[in-house]
């Protein structure tokens, strides 16, 4: 669930996911998600994503995924197809865990508003996250994520920057609550957005 402080919007996101280990290094993941806004009165987006991850070494991994999302526009719902290539690194230093992920997205939007919308778009996402595990039942973390536009002339510009801080609490085994704050800078639109999140999770 997320609340945007500047627009005073309230959204409820619900997702369910599963993963299967195909081998010691290869795993298959699936996730379905719904996003409601206006206090649950409007389905903003429904999506399903299938991904494949391969661990090259203990710390380095690569992957690929396909996501189908049906997004709401003013005149109806329009599908968005997203293909991604993923590379990442993760390691633990004592009680500190560090993770980095690069995700190149090729996105084809069926909602055509401008002439350039006919062509697929390329967005390169980079995210680094730090998690501290030295406190019993608590998992404080911070992250920075950047979205880069990749243009037809090899232009590489930052479109969005996200700064986040979160704290997860494990009340019972495999049941947790996460409270977080994210500050998002929309460089192109010259807009800043504050988002407060509260999440409840259950693992089986």
Image (spheres, rainbow, N blue to C red):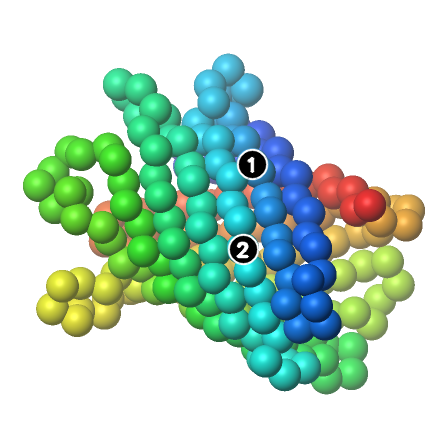
Image quadrant where residue 140 sits = bottom right
At 78% from the left edge and 77% from the top edge, which residue is drawn? 95
Q: Position of residue 159 (x, y in %)?
A: 29, 58
Within-10-Å neighbours for mark 1: few <14, some 14–19, many 20+: some
Mark number, residue 153: none
| Residue 168 % position (x, y) | 74, 53
Identified at 81% across, 59% down, the residue is 138
Q: Quadrant of residue 113?
A: top left
The quadrant the N terminus occupies is: top right
Disc 2: which residue? 51
Q: Secondary structure at mark 1?
A: strand
- Residue drawn at x 35%, y 43% as measured from the top left: 81
Tag 1 residue? 33
Near-viewer residue (133 or 110): 110
Above or below residue 80? Residue 18 is below
* Front tag of 2 and 1: 2
Q: Is residue 35 visible?
A: yes
Image quarter in which the C terminus is found: top right
Residue farthest along the front direction in this orientation: 22
Q: Nearer the viewer, residue 171 or 33?
A: 33
Extreme-top residue of the structure: 41
Q: In the drawing, does residue 147 fall left or right of residue 45?
A: left
Contact (CB < 8 A) between labels 2 and 1?
Answer: no
Q: Residue at x 17, y 43 (%)?
A: 117
């Amino acid at each position: 669930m997320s609340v945007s402080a500047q627009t005073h919007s309230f959204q409820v996101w619900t997702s369910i996911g599963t993963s299967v280990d195909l081998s010691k290094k290869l795993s298959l993941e699936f996730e379905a998600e719904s996003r409601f806004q206006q206090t649950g009165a409007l389905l903003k987006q429904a999506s399903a994503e299938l991904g494949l991850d391969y661990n090259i070494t203990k710390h380095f991994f690569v992957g690929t995924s396909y996501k189908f999302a049906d997004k709401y526009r003013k005149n109806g719902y329009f599908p968005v197809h997203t293909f991604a290539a993923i590379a990442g690194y993760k390691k633990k230093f004592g009680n500190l865990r560090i993770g980095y992920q690069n995700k190149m997205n090729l996105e084809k939007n069926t909602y055509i508003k401008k002439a350039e919308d006919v062509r697929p778009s390329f967005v390169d996402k980079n995210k680094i996250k730090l998690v501290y595990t030295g406190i019993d039942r608590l998992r404080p973390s911070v992250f920075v994520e950047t979205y880069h536009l990749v243009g037809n002339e090899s232009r590489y510009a930052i479109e969005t920057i996200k700064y986040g801080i979160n704290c997860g609490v494990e009340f019972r085994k495999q049941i947790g609550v996460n409270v977080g704050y994210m500050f998002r800078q929309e460089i192109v639109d010259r807009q800043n957005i504050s988002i407060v999140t509260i999440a409840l999770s259950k693992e089986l």
